[in-house]
Image: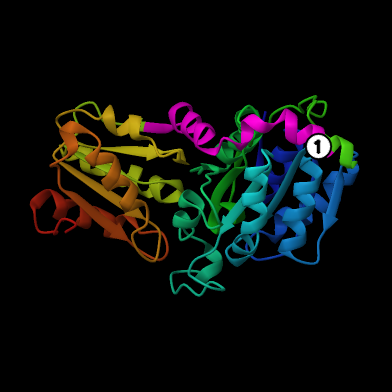
């Protein structure tokens, strides 16, 4: 049965129903309502909630909790996630499949984007850090980005099931607007789950055994290559005969979908490739694009082009896309249909310049 849920509350409830035993976090707009919801709900179901004194404490508490083999989650935004990077890379290096929920805010530093709603309305400005690493060493997190509250719930509910076989951190990368909006959601059932058998109790003897038992997870490149091959996720929309392909993620893709529908009604052969995982980036989705494609347009809700670089790389690794021109639209705040359609029409007419 579907019920009306606020995005932040729905994401928190999804993590609980997926089996989260520990939540530790620190307040920061626009994700504080996740923590507030957890503070009441986790004790109700016999789980542990901790409000930390900083993001550094949050990530290291989750690190320690995950060593016991239990599902542990934290959430933050912008600079809060940046402060967590050392702990996140450490979780990667030790093979700990923690869940991080990033409710993105707009802009660099403390977030001062000038788009509609300011920095707290959120955007996709953390793309580079989330997909290419903000911490030290060679590592990658699985990164999923939803376009609706229902998809956010589903991604969180399945996140640990995907991440645990690889023993790898996983990020739900979303934006302020999705956390604050409300939609009808069908909430999944509670998962019954025991701690994983590789968990430790903190003694030095067990830690030595843990390191010996889990030496395979120290082969970073092998783990990353397996995830890159197996966990690409994307959606195809009206691509069978498309001559123009829009690439967009998150809430931005919903605006693109509406614009595409209007252009289709005018006879334009246009479709969309929507990455659902931005790491690993869906190279296979680009490989599957039809040979009718003549132009590719990357649309981002960001201060500047970030996903564009991954789009260009994916095209250059696809034989029939190597010489296809690519175009870029970036904007702080969601681009409205009344602006996006003229931009796409300019791409089609040749009045918009391709990326140099």
Position of residue 1 measured from the top left corner of the image (x, y, whole percent): 67, 28
- The reply, left or right, for residue 151 in relation to residue 269 is right
Q: Main secondary structure of the magenta part?
A: helix
Position of residue 179 measured from the top left corner of the image (x, y, whole percent): 60, 53
Viewer-proximal residue among 167 and 11: 167
Q: Which residue is mark 1?
A: 208
Position of residue 57 measured from the top left corner of the image (x, y, whole percent): 77, 60
Viewer-proximal residue among 351 and 181: 351
Position of residue 258 measured from the top left corner of the image (x, y, whole percent): 34, 44
Going 69% across and 29% down the picture, which residue do you hit?
A: 188
- Which range of residues does the magenta coloring cover? 207-235
- The reply, left or right, for residue 16 in relation to residue 2 is right
Vertical relation: 287 (above or below) 279: above
Determine the secondary structure under disc 1.
helix
Going 51% across and 32% down the picture, which residue do you hit?
A: 222
- The reply, left or right, for residue 187 in relation to residue 328 is right
Give the image quarter of residue 240.
top left
Q: How many marks?
A: 1
The answer to whether one can see residue 6 in this image is no
The answer to whether one can see residue 43 in this image is yes
Going 19% across and 57% down the picture, which residue do you hit?
A: 355
């Amino acid at each position: 049965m579907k019920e009306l849920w606020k995005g932040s509350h729905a994401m928190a409830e999804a993590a609980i129903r997926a089996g989260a035993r520990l939540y530790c976090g620190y307040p920061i707009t626009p994700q504080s309502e996740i923590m507030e919801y957890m503070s009441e709900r986790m004790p109700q179901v016999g789980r542990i909630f901790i409000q930390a004194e900083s993001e550094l404490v949050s990530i290291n508490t989750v690190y320690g909790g995950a060593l016991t083999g239990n599902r542990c989650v934290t959430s933050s935004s912008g600079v809060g996630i940046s402060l967590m990077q050392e702990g996140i890379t450490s979780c990667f290096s030790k093979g700990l499949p923690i869940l991080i929920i990033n409710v993105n805010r707009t802009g660099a530093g403390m977030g001062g984007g000038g788009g509609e709603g300011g920095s707290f309305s959120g955007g996709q400005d953390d793309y580079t850090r989330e997909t290419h690493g903000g911490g030290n060493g060679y590592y990658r997190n699985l990164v999923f980005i939803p376009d609706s509250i229902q998809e956010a719930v589903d991604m969180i509910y399945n996140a640990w099931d995907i991440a645990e076989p690889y023993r790898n951190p996983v990020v739900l990368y979303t934006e302020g607007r999705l956390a604050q909006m409300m939609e009808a959601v069908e909430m999944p059932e509670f998962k019954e789950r025991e701690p994983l058998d590789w968990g430790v109790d903190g003694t030095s003897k067990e830690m030595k055994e843990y390191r010996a038992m889990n030496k395979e997870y120290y082969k970073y490149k092998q783990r990353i290559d397996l995830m890159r091959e197996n966990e690409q996720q994307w959606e195809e929309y009206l691509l069978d005969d498309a001559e123009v392909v829009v690439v967009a993620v998150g809430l931005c893709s919903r605006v693109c979908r509406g614009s595409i529908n209007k252009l289709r009604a005018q006879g334009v052969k246009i479709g969309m490739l929507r990455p659902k995982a931005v790491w690993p980036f869906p190279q296979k989705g680009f490989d599957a694009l039809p040979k009718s494609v003549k132009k590719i347009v990357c649309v981002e809700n960001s201060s500047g082009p970030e996903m564009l670089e991954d789009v260009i790389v994916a095209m250059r690794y696809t034989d029939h896309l190597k010489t296809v021109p690519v175009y870029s639209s970036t904007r702080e705040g969601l681009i409205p249909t009344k602006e996006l359609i003229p931009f796409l029409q300019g791409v089609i007419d040749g009045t918009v310049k391709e990326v140099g």
